[in-house]
Image (cartoon, rainbow, N blue to C red):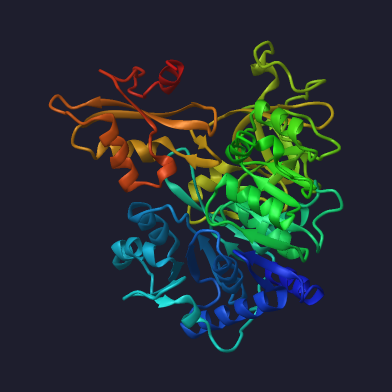
Amino acid sequence: MNLVEHVQSAVDEHPENVAIHHEGREQTYEEFWERTGRFAAALEREGIEPDDRVAVYLPNLPQFVTAFHGIMRAGGIVVPMNPQYRSRELEHLLGDSGANAVVTLPSLVEHVEDVREDTDVEFVVTVGAETETSTAFEEFLADDTFGPVKRDDDDVACQPYTSGTTGTPKGVLLTHKNLYWDADVADDPIPDGIRGDDRHLGVLPLFHIYGMTVTMNATLFNGGAYYPMAEWDAEDAVDLIEGENLTLLHAVPAMYNDLVNQPDAAEFDFSSLRFANSGGSGLPMEVLETWDDMYDVPLCEGYGLTETSPITHANHPDDRRPGSIGKPLPGVDARIVDDDFNAIAPVEDGPVDEDEAALHEITGELVISGPNVMKGYYERPEANEEAFTEADGKRWFHTGDVGYHDEDGFFYVVDRKKHMIVTGGYNVYPREVEELLFEHEDVADAAVVGVPDERRGETVKAFVVKTPDGDVTADELKQFCLDNLAPYKHPREVEFVQELPRTTTGKVQKYELAGEE
């Protein structure tokens, strides 16, 4: 059974249930399914064939949900793209994926057109008004429905992009089985699972695997109602939770930090919530404790990656260990291994005091095996060779995260093996920002690191060496980055230095820069 067939089963079982609720408008499952079929028919009309890729370059809107499932009904592969991306970032994603079409907003068409001649994009569909080079979404829909096209478990369904140690975005090949299996088990930590009467706040971005699988697909698999929010706003989220009696909440730590720090946070009526989960980056203990003091619904923490569809670990409300990412989900195997892939024994009790413990003796890399692990990176044979190890008859994925586990089965992540910065749940790879800074005429050298940030967990900081005649200011460099990258990637701090600390082989010693904080 492929992902589309899973959704179709929910449609058959709950045709009159609300599938999507957005700004006061509702779509039943029957109406939602009909629109996905019309979108699939339109793609087929325009020449989209099985395994063709279609990019969805949208915020959280009902049309994202329609396009996502419509593409799969036509047998295509979804390439989700962050609507904060600009031409520079689109050039690689569209070029690398070979996407034949793009679904986006009128205001974003200019970025597509900037790079279109160097890509395989044949047509553009816009949610809202048409433009000179695009067709309006409602006009694009066919009169009749089409599909679902037969797809097998191992066929690729979605190709989101992530980055490796080089910072070059890589396409992640997620199969139908990867996605439907993980959406099926995503409700394991939720008491009684996701039900047909659940109402799920869709604040996690749909271009991100967390929002795609855990909020959208897991809800639609079970007949619940999905409430997408196009942009995060704490006050709007509270209004939705209270006004619509929402029952399920998945968010990143920065969002929970915003909620508990609202002036009247203690007065919020969250009594309708029966489950709340945090993922995307580490949850600060202060935020967790404040939430638990204010509200009756326990805040649970989980863990996952784009390459694992995403969720691999979770805490349960009745089996929760603060500071832990939880236990592996049913069907997921996880180990902590050393550099030679030898398993590292668990500690007796966790979490340990990381300031007191001999971490080098108990920590190693977290590796994952299971039906949710990606097929591989798109056309990246060397990256695939580095990402996987065959052992004990299983294929293990290297997460790049360092952690330990305890005898009760709880896992803990203490650091990132790579230099990735996680800011507000978004991944930022320093090299991408550094390469842009190097393009500025007043920059002679630059290094980017993550520094602690109370709200976002980490934020981006750039250390810059000016050219001899350079007179650029910190604010000007920030704006330069804002003009060329997604906003969350820009350095919120810029410090000018005379030189960067380097090893004898010329590598920047980033730990020294971070240590200066």
Q: Quadrant of the N terminus?
A: bottom right
The location of residue 354, given as percent across then percent down, is 66, 17
Res 336 seen here:
yes
Residue 435 location (% of width, % of height): 32, 39
Residue at the extreme left: 469
Q: Position of residue 301 (x, y in %)?
A: 71, 37
Horizontal side of residue 181 vs 55, given as left or right: right
In this view, 4 is above or below 511:
below
Q: Looking at this rendering, what residue extends furthest in the top direction?
A: 356
223 to the left or right of 212: right
- Residue drawn at x 73%, y 30% is 324
Residue at image point 21% right, 26% down:
466
Is residue 309 something that shows in the picture?
no
Q: Is residue 70 above or below residue 268?
A: below
- Name of the residue lying farthest toward the bottom: 143
| Count of marks, rendered view | 0
Image position of 438 (left or right of 67) = left
User: x and y percent of residue 364 in the render?
Assistant: 65, 26
Nearer-the-camera pick, 322 or 249: 249
Q: Quadrant of residue 97?
A: bottom left
**Quarter of the image where the C terminus is located:** top left
Instruction: Decide which of 194, 370 is in the foreground and name it.
Output: 194
The image quarter containing residue 3 is: bottom right
Q: Quadrant of residue 255?
A: top right
Of 209 and 157, nearer the camera is: 209
Q: Residue at x 71, y 64 (%)?
A: 220
